[in-house]
Amino acid sequence: MSRTVLITGATGTVSTALMNALRGAEVDLRALVRDGSAADGPRERGAEVFAGDLGDARSLPPAFEGVRDLWLLTPNGPRAPENAMNAVWAARQAGVERVVRLSVVGAAHDAPNRSGRLHALSDREIERCGMRWTILRPHWFMQNLLNEAGDIAATGTFSLNMASARIGMIDVRDVAECAARVLLDDPDRHHGETYTLTGPRSLTFDEVAGELGLALGRPVTYLPVGDEAKRRTLLGHGVPEWIADMLEEYARAYASGWGDFTTDTLAGLLGRPPRDIAGFARDHAPAFIPARDG
């Protein structure tokens, strides 16, 4: 008998990749979306779509009815612990058997960023939820580089306030495949585990620029900038202030060396090494090419 898996954050990068990774598996996919107009993507991936908002506990019970496994991804923001609590409450009321939660790298009550501390609150609730649980803590996503695609396409440069940070960045597709592996395994196999997921090596953004340049066949240059300059750019693109603050806090932590590590956890879960930045650059090269050349 196939299990029903409820995917939250269903229109986002990680959850979309997870639905791709689960395609063809013996599970019944169900997707939670805040806005019914965003249902096409999950439906195309074979999911039954329910409208509901993790910020509104009363909207959740219909989506959770009959669910065995919950993939829990909450929006970034100061209400993230409330969103996670609402999902856990609905899951417990519906008799959900297992929760697999996407946390963040370095989540802890003494993390050097508010996001990490908020995620630590949600992680603790998952640990005490009374259901089987697994927590994934992925490192900085390679796909974050797609936010710089416009500048790279136009000028061959990209600017971040990361100084000479070295980061064990990971491809989102690998995060999704790890989540799929956990969800497809017996619920007891990964119960009580917290998995920190990284790429195969720590990279500077100069090294990232070099790999992007090789994939594109033209030079790409990383230009470090200060926090205030990056903040102005983000706010100018309509990024909410809380998110801009969060990104600045992470950038300061990474610039201090906080992200310079890797683990072998992914290889243990998937039986293969993580994707490298070179593969990411080749696979996503079209995103970094000017439209007139594409």
Image (cartoon, rainbow, N blue to C red):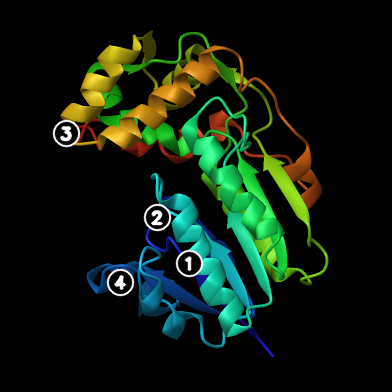
Q: Nearer the viewer, mark 4 or mark 2?
A: 2
User: For the residue carrying disc 3, how many other residues have a C-alpha within 10 Å: few (<14), some (14-19), or many (20+)?
Assistant: few
Which residue carries the number 2 mark? 12
Is residue 8 shown above or below 222?
Answer: below
Q: CA distance from mark 2 to mark 3?
A: 28 Å
Q: At which x and y percent is residue 36?
A: 26, 74
For residue 20, side relative to residue 130 (left or right): left
Q: At which x and y percent is residue 270?
A: 74, 52
Q: Nearer the viewer, mark 4 or mark 1?
A: 1
Q: CA distance from mark 4 to mark 1?
A: 25 Å
Q: Residue at x 40, y 31 (%)?
A: 246
Q: CA distance from mark 1 to mark 2?
A: 19 Å
Does residue 101 appear in the picture of this structure? yes
Residue 40 got which mark?
4
For residue 104, side relative to residue 201 (left or right): left
Of the numbered discs 2 and 3, the one sitting upstream in the chain is 2
Of the numbered discs 1 and 2, the one sitting upstream in the chain is 2
On the image, which quarter does residue 272 sit in?
top right
Of the numbered discs 4 and 2, the one sitting upstream in the chain is 2
Q: CA distance from mark 3 to mark 1?
A: 47 Å
Q: Residue at x 22, y 22 (%)?
A: 233
Q: Nearer the viewer, mark 3 or mark 4?
A: 4
Tell me whether circle 2 and circle 3 mark residues in contact (CB < 8 Å): no
* Amino acid identity at mark 3: Arg
Which residue carries the number 1 mark? 86
Which quarter of the rendered picture does the N terminus lie within? bottom right
Is residue 90 shown above or below 85?
Answer: below
Residue 57 got which mark?
none
* Amino acid identity at mark 4: Asp
Is residue 150 shown above or below 191?
Answer: above
